[in-house]
Image: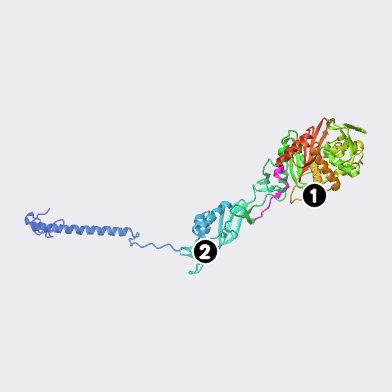
Amino acid sequence: MADPRSTGPDRYGVTWLGRGTTSWGIPLSADLGERSTSRTRKRLIIAAAVVLVAAITFVGVLQLRSTGDATGQAPTTPEPPPELTAADVANQFLEALTHNQAEEAGRLTDDPAAATAQLTEVWRTLQPSSAAATRTGAPNPPPAATAADEQFTLTWQLGPDRVWEYQNGLHLVKAEAGWRVQWQPAVVHPRLGAGQSLAVRGGVGQPAVVDRDGAPLVVWTADGTAPADPAVAPRLTGALGRTVGGQGGPIGWYVALVDAAGAEVDVVFGNKTAPQVATLSVPVQKAAQAAVDTQQNPAMLVAIQPSTGDILAVAQNAAAGDAAVALNGLYPPGSAFKIATAAALMEAGVADAGTVVPCPASKRIEQRTIDNAGGFALPDGPLHTAFAMSCNTTFAEQGAKLGFGALSDAANQFGLGADFEIPGITTETGAVPVAANVAEQVENSIGQGRVQVSCLGLALMTGTVAAGNAITPRLWRDLPTTVVAGYQAPPPNVVRALRTMMREVVTSGRAKALAGNGNVFGKTGTAQIGDGTSAHGWFAGYREDIAFAVLVEQAGTSEVAVGVTGTFLGALG
């Protein structure tokens, strides 16, 4: 430090005025007295205050500069975002709608909750892989307008080769919060109403064939058709599927308006092709199948509705094979054919239901010896008793009195000579050639010899008795059966007599086991085959509006077929 006695400034810029005094006039000598000390303190406080104010000012300037731009300009207040135009709102809404952003789209409407719920439901029911909207008319309302409209094309991608495209529009309204889409379900589709949604129907998994009550029998698959339930009508579902498949392929998909319960209200797009309706009845079919499945030997059952000719059931067990032999397999009917023989006798005037006839245990007629099953014999009695007890000797002896063409003619009156073309299936009803001699006539009169029938044929026979007129079997409600060769039923008086005789078979004859199954009419049959040591068992009949025929191959007796019939009728209630 410079000599305090110097009067010039030192290197710090401070000028020393004399001993103990600075250029600020602050005395440095401690012995200057109390007044000098007080003055010194006061000046120090003022100097500190000046420094503090300068520091605060400096910090404030730094803060102001930190909020300015890069050039050091003073900060400005941010401007509010520009108000969305009607076109902006329309674009954002359509963007959200087509990207499954239901909540975002809802916020752009005047009813966010309803819009969000509706759009969520539409995406759930349509399940599109994608969607797109193309504006076809942009809203450009004048500044003072409070409403505007937007036109657009909406395209839904609903699966491979499934594109749904349509025109629609938005109505926008301007409120305090700005432009909003005026919400209504028609925003999604012009025909969509309150409480409704959209759903894709048809195609794979949908019914191709249903039964008479609408229950699915056959459904569409990617490759064609398949049974809806493999256990129901397994011998028919393939034929049913081929029939509908040959009519133009799988059912067309379509978009339907559906209510809250999913029921269809209307079809808004596509071709709704209703499934074909078969005459089959799933409950009857199940009962028939369960009945034949009780047997180890080949067994089959055909049921038809006499009033309409509708085929209600065609059932075969596994032992009967895969072919539909119940519809076209021909077998000797045995005593079940006595329905036709009785009709021939009555029409020819040989005998009527009350004519007294013999029933020996055995009877030789020319070169043929006829025996009753089990060797039973009955005293002379009315024809209806011989019919109920299935007396072979009676019908062989009386049949021999008929002309050789009488049995063939009588059989034709029950449809056994008819020829029907039913879409999807091949049918044979039977064959009863004109006898060449008495021996053949005797055999034919008891359902042996050259007489052959199918299970369908015998169901047609008993159905004719039930209806009292010729019936045409059919498998489809809307696909008609072609009658290549038709038939006419027996005269009413003959039909009435046959009904009485067939009822007696159940009340006191060979089918008494069915007496507890309601008002059943029918005829038993045991048909010898081969060398006569084996026989098929038959029962053909009707109850109310169901006619049926049951065959159990090599059963040995008709009792087995009667048992199957009881199981069938019992299941129907």
Residue type at mark 1 is Thr
The residue singled out by tag 1 in the image is: 482
Residue 459: quadrant of the picture: top right
Query: Can residue 441 be seen from the camera position used here?
Result: no
Q: Is residue 150 left or right of residue 17?
A: right
Instruction: Check disc 2 and report its element: helix, strand or loop.
Output: strand
User: Do the CB atoms of the residues marked 2 and 1 lie less than 8 Å apart?
Assistant: no
Closest to the observer: 538 or 300? 538
Query: Can residue 374 be seen from the camera position used here?
Result: yes
Residue 315: quadrant of the picture: top right
Closest to the observer: 164 or 108? 108
Please provide the residue range marked out in magenta.
270-285
Residue 280 pos. (x, y %): 72, 46
- Vertical placement of 336 versus 208: above or below? above
Residue 312 part of the magenta segment = no
Residue 448 pos. (x, y %): 85, 36
Residue type at mark 2 is Leu
Q: Quadrant of the C terminus?
A: top right
Q: Dot 2 surroundings within 10 Å: few (below 14), some, or many (20 or more)? A: many
**Alpha carbon distance from label 2 to label 1:** 62 Å
Residue 28: quadrant of the picture: bottom left
- Vertical placement of 353 versus 37: above or below? above
Question: If you read the primary sequence from the N terminus, does the residue marked by circle 2 or circle 1 appear first?
Answer: 2
Q: Is residue 402 left or right of residue 267?
A: right
Instruction: Check disc 1 and report its element: helix, strand or loop.
Output: strand
Residue 507 pos. (x, y %): 79, 39
Residue 341 pos. (x, y %): 87, 40
Residue 276 part of the magenta segment = yes
The residue singled out by tag 2 in the image is: 172
